[in-house]
Image: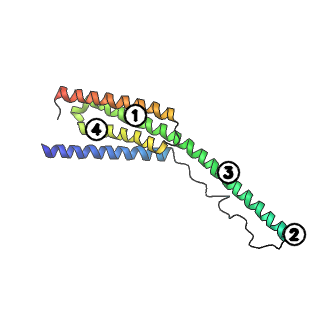
Amino acid sequence: MTGNKIINGIIGVIIAVVLSLLLTLGIKVFYPEPEYPRTEPFAKEAPYLNVTCQGSDKECIAEQKKVEEGRQAYYKEQQKVQDEFEKTRKAYEHDLFIIANILGIIFFLAGMGLLSIYEKIGLNVVAGVLASGGFGIFYGYIRGWQGADDILKFIVGIVVAIMVVASAVVINNLVRKHNVK
């Protein structure tokens, strides 16, 4: 009997891991992360003039001023690209927070739904699906934390807390009622 419990526990963990991997890979496939730009202006280097001008050499000083203006324009363009990427990344993290939490909640609710047929499929399957839902929620919080505002995090946290407490009550009642061990 103990060997059977160990095998069932291992199977439950494997189910949780596989479903969690599918959840994260599905998000990556259908909602890919923005990539940092590797094209202009980063493909070129900032203008540079390696010459020291004498105080009276107006032509050299004018050339240095021109090069410096080019450098400033280059850095300004770099900053613009960086700012645009940060804006895109923050929007992605916000959406990722929502997507991962919705998927986590769906997996979690699916696990709760499977409780009605646990005698046919086993508690290890239910536990694996519930755990993968929990992972989806955790993944959403970890990866999307910077992009989600505090109100959204709080609301999702309340929903998750209610689901977890309710599922614990249901599972505990089920265990008592059916004397599941």
Label 3, on which residue?
Answer: 80
Query: Which quadrant, please, contains the C terminus?
Result: top left
Label 1, on which residue?
Answer: 105
Label 4, on which residue?
Answer: 127
Viewer-nearest of labels 2 and 4?
2
- Upstream in the sequence, badge 4 or badge 1? 1
Q: Measured from the top left, where is residue 118 in percent x and y?
A: 24, 32
Specify the amino acid type for callout 1. Ile
- Upstream in the sequence, badge 2 or badge 4? 2
Q: Measured from the top left, where is residue 17 in percent x and y?
A: 33, 46
Viewer-nearest of labels 1 and 2?
2
Q: Measured from the top left, where is residue 45 in percent x and y?
A: 68, 65
Residue at left 21%, top 43%? 8
Rendered image: mark on residue 58? 2
Specify the amino acid type for callout 3. Lys
Q: What element carries label 2?
A: helix
Q: Is mark 4 on a helix, strand or loop?
A: helix
- Most foreground residue, 10 or 78: 78
